[in-house]
Amino acid sequence: MWLHGPQMKATISAVLIGLALLSAGCVGTVSGKKTAGVPLVRDRIEGRYERPATQVYEAAKDVLRLNGVLVSESTLHGGFSEGGVRVLEGRVNERRVWISVEQIDPRVSSVVVQARTRGGGADLYLCHELEKQIALRLVGR
């Protein structure tokens, strides 16, 4: 049974509205905030290092400054000593970048790098590149 006239227009409109809702929305950042972006897309890379969180944080800050612009620094849930998370926000190659650093246990720290394009898409290549540069910077310390 084929749809004709108003039924076909209503069906096409419903499909287009559904696609628009699925392709745009808000996504959470590692800073705990929300930003416009395409949901359900992997947009972050995590690395773990046997280093204190303060060293990892300084390395992440250096890498962000070398590749782009550091926009802000913040702390979530207290400082490193209280099990908190430190977050950097910046811009690299017209991408928004968030980097969080957390002390997992007394010997291991975690860094999560997240990047989004201007249109809200993920940039995993940039995430991987920045995370690798943080690791290489830690080797030199």
Image (spheres, rainbow, N blue to C red):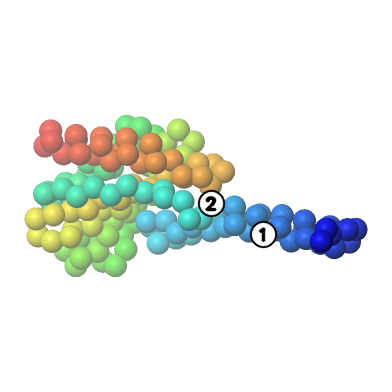
Give the residue at x 12% y 33%.
140
Q: Residues within 10 Å of mark 1 (few under 14, many from 20)?
A: few
Identified by mark 1, the residue type is Gly
- Residue that label 2 marks: 38
In this rendering, position of residue 47 left or right of residue 71: left
From the image, which quarter does the N terminus lie in?
Answer: bottom right
Give the residue at x 32% y 63%.
76
SS type, badge 2: loop
- Residue that label 1 marks: 18
From the image, which quarter does the C terminus lie in?
Answer: top left
Residue at far right of view:
5
Which x, y percent locates residue 133?
25, 35
Which x, y percent locates residue 114?
38, 48
In this rendering, position of residue 138 left or right of residue 119: left
Which x, y percent locates residue 57?
23, 48
Which picture quadrant has residue 130?
top left
Instruction: Between residue 4 and residue 73, name the one nearer to us.
Output: 4
SS type, badge 1: helix
